[in-house]
Amino acid sequence: MLEKLKAKWGLKTNWDIIAVLIVFSISGSSIMFVKPLWYHLFGVTDATPTWLKVIIWLAMVFPTYQAFLLIYGFIFGQFKFFWAKEKKMAMAIGRLFGRRKDKAPD
């Protein structure tokens, strides 16, 4: 299994794989500790409607998680790996929301 991940992700050692998996785990766990901070920043209270809490949370979880991946990736020596993934994801999002060049303007 580790060999498949090494080939898929372009990593060289088993430590690289383990470090990447640790970064994913810690980033996912850390996101839950930031939730109260984001809610406090946006003034969310118990009286705030649930639908609004969900929208705020979804809007904040994605960029925060990406930042955690880069920070922890740096700490564990895998910044290059996560930076490449971030750039790839940014390009995909840009294509999703960007204007296509193959279509003629109206």
Image: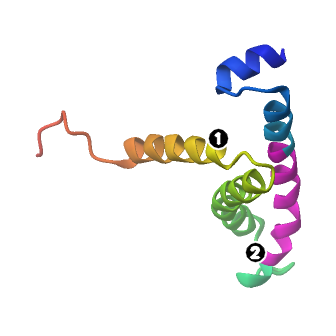
Magenta includes 25?
yes
Residue at mark 2 to residue at mark 1: CA–CA distance:
28 Å
**Residue on which disc 2 sits:** 38
Residue 4's label in the rendered image is none
Residue type at tag 2: Trp
Looking at the picture, tell me which residue is in the foreground, 96 or 22.
22
**Callout 2 crowding tier (Cα within 10 Å): few <14, some 14–19, many ≥20:** some
Looking at the picture, tell me which residue is in the foreground, 74 or 53.
74
> What residue appears at the point 62 percent right and 45 percent down from the top-left corner?
80
Q: Secondary structure at mark 2?
A: helix
Query: Vertically, is 40 above or below 84?
Result: below
Magenta includes 14?
no
Residue type at tag 1: Phe
In percent of width and height, residue 43 lies at 74, 85
Residue 81's label in the rendered image is 1
**Where is the N terminus found, in terms of image quarters?**
top right
